[in-house]
Image (tube, grey):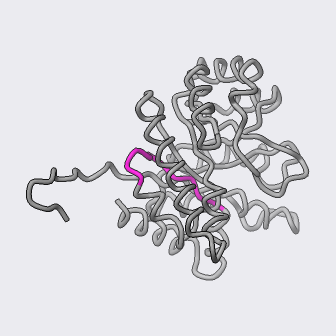
Amino acid sequence: MTTAGSPRRLSPARLRLGVNIDHVATIRNARGGAHPDPVRAAQIVAACGGDGITAHLREDRRHIRDEDLARIQAATKLPLNLEMAATEEMLAIALRHRPHAACIVPERREERTTEGGLDAAGQHNRLAPIVARLTDAGIRVSLFIAPEPRQIEAAMMLRAPVVELHTGEYAHACQDAGGGEQVAVELRRIADMAALAAKEGIEPHAGHGLTYDNVQPIAAIPQLAELNIGHYLIGEAIFTGLEHAVRHMRELMDDAR
């Protein structure tokens, strides 16, 4: 609501929702066989308001498998965002499949999920040729980074057109019953780095640990163009169905804007 003499706030652009379907494949792989099929999940996401599909092909193939990538691309017109480690093996796979986007993430075999942002500042020489080869192939490169100025600067030096800001610390703070002050600190960090990235011509995205309960303050950050959410939506889908889970997240994001 505006007051007399205050500028009218323009409505921000629609915030895109990318849905990570890795954990559909995790459930499939727990027993082997072909069910549940992550391709079917991608088709449901496309039918109920999702804007993109995210899939992380890990070194140990614990969820998404190589053959899933081509099947997902053939089954839906939604853009595929391939999360990948900065390795020659993953680079070759990305160049073969030519996804819409490739998000470079840190990866440790023993981790359950991605535990933090990529140190783009400390790994410039390792990342530069990978970013260049992906870019030359027409693949939009994203760097999954902590919301820190030095990482934004590194993304600029690497000429990455997109950064995805790691929201894990914010999500952890939201789970802490007495973490209100820390929630505000983490939210400000994300908002400031989204604004800095946008100012420097980099499109800011965000993701990790986002839920129905904590997504709206993040979704309200006007510079953010996309949120990538996976584990929570697949978990909710067990109880309410994937279509309902995606639609409800979409509604919360739209209401925040």
> Residue at coordinates 58% horizontally, 81% vertically from top-left?
240
44 lies left or right of 5: right
> Residue at coordinates 17% horizontally, 61% vertically from top-left?
2
Tell me if residue 227 comes above or below residue 80 in the rendering.
below
Q: Quadrant of the C terminus?
A: bottom left
> Residue at coordinates 37% horizontally, 49% vertically from top-left?
222
Q: Nearer the viewer, residue 138 or 73?
A: 138
Q: Nearer the viewer, residue 120 or 64?
A: 120
Query: Residue 93 in the image: x percent, y percent?
Result: 75, 32
The magenta-colored residue range is 221-230
Q: Judge whether residue 83 is colored magenta.
A: no
In this view, which residue lies farthest toward the bottom?
A: 239
Q: Nearer the viewer, residue 99 or 142?
A: 142
> Which is the main secondary structure of the residues drawn in magenta?
loop
Q: Judge whether residue 224 is colored magenta.
A: yes
> Residue at coordinates 70% horizontally, 43% vertically from top-left?
117
